[in-house]
Image (tube, rainbow, N blue to C red):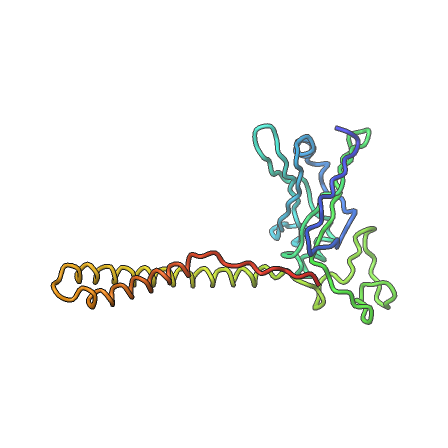
């Protein structure tokens, strides 16, 4: 393994960097697991909260995900620095954040450092009002180097609209099922009536009018339910 490898995968659309140059804490206590992670391929970072942690209820564990020879492994590498983890958990922004692997470096004596970034939804710029945590205000807080947030998450933040679109998709799917079921029922009733009319004596043209109408109506409803929907084109703004 070389002395250092940079990663920095592309930032997802709609996201920006909230924290950068953060090192995973406690990896020296997990040397074997960390080396297995480094020797793998397609490296990713994952995380989860650990509210049961007796020393820090805001603790966030970081896991290394990598492809090994015969399987994909997901093992705990360490923790998010305590001060950053507390800001994330108490600020209520945890569900909207993502990890971005930055750099892995190994010193001559085997000292390993894994750095990462924390990404979040793009925040709206507001030049008139400054956050209490931004430079130039009376209230100044001391943050570790490279971990200072700029208006972490407030009313100005833009959240992805995926939840709204998912609800629309579910409603549309249920409506399609109802339409297809109704159409199938009408077609079935029309077919049954048509069979009876065919077997009966009388004016076949008159007797088949209602069954044919039901079958055609049911077919149209079924087609309405199964036909592909047109995707709206996004016009550039």
x and y percentages locating residue 89 in the rendered image: 67, 57
The extreme bottom residue here reads 128
Residue at 60% x, 51% y is: 52
Quarter location, residue 138: bottom right
Between residue 23 and residue 6, name the one nearer to us. Answer: 6
Side of 39 where 144 appears, left or right? right
Q: Is residue 101 above or below residue 123?
A: above
x and y percentages locating residue 102 in the rendered image: 75, 43
Side of 58 where 21 appears, left or right? right
Residue at 43% x, 63% y is: 175
Quarter location, residue 213: bottom left
Residue at 66% x, 41% y is: 44
x and y percentages locating residue 154 in the rendered image: 71, 66
The extreme right residue here reads 136
Location of the N terminus by quadrant is top right
x and y percentages locating residue 131 in the rendered image: 79, 66
Between residue 139 and residue 204, name the one nearer to us. Answer: 204
The extreme left residue here reads 201
Location of the C terminus by quadrant is bottom right
Between residue 82 and residue 102, name the one nearer to us. Answer: 102
Residue at 63% x, 36% y is: 66
Q: Is residue 36 above or below residue 64?
A: above
Image label count: 0
Between residue 15 and residue 114, name the one nearer to us. Answer: 15
Q: Is residue 12 above or below residue 135?
A: above
Side of 167 where 99 appears, left or right? right
């Amino acid at each position: 393994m070389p002395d250092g490898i940079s990663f920095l995968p592309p930032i997802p659309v709609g996201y920006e960097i909230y924290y950068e140059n953060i090192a995973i804490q406690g990896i020296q206590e997990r040397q074997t697991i960390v080396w297995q992670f480094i020797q793998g391929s397609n490296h990713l970072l994952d995380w989860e909260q650990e509210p049961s942690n007796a020393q820090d209820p805001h603790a966030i564990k970081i896991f290394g995900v990598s492809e090994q020879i015969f399987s994909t492994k997901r093992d705990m590498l360490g923790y998010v620095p305590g001060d950053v983890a507390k800001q994330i958990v108490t600020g209520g922004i945890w569900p909207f954040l993502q990890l971005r692997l930055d750099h892995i470096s190994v010193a001559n004596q085997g000292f390993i450092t894994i750095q990462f970034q924390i990404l979040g939804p793009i925040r709206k710029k507001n030049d008139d009002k400054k956050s209490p945590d931004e430079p130039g205000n009376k209230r100044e807080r001391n943050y570790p180097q490279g971990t200072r947030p700029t208006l972490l998450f407030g009313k100005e933040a833009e959240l992805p609209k995926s939840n709204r679109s998912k609800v629309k998709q579910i409603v549309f799917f249920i409506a399609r099922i109802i339409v297809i079921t109704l159409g199938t029922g009408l077609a079935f009733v029309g077919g049954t009536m048509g069979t009876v009319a065919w077997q009966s004596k009388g004016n076949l043209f008159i007797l088949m009018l209602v069954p044919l109408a039901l079958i055609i109506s049911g077919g149209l409803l079924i087609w309405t339910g199964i036909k592909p929907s047109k995707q709206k084109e996004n016009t550039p703004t």
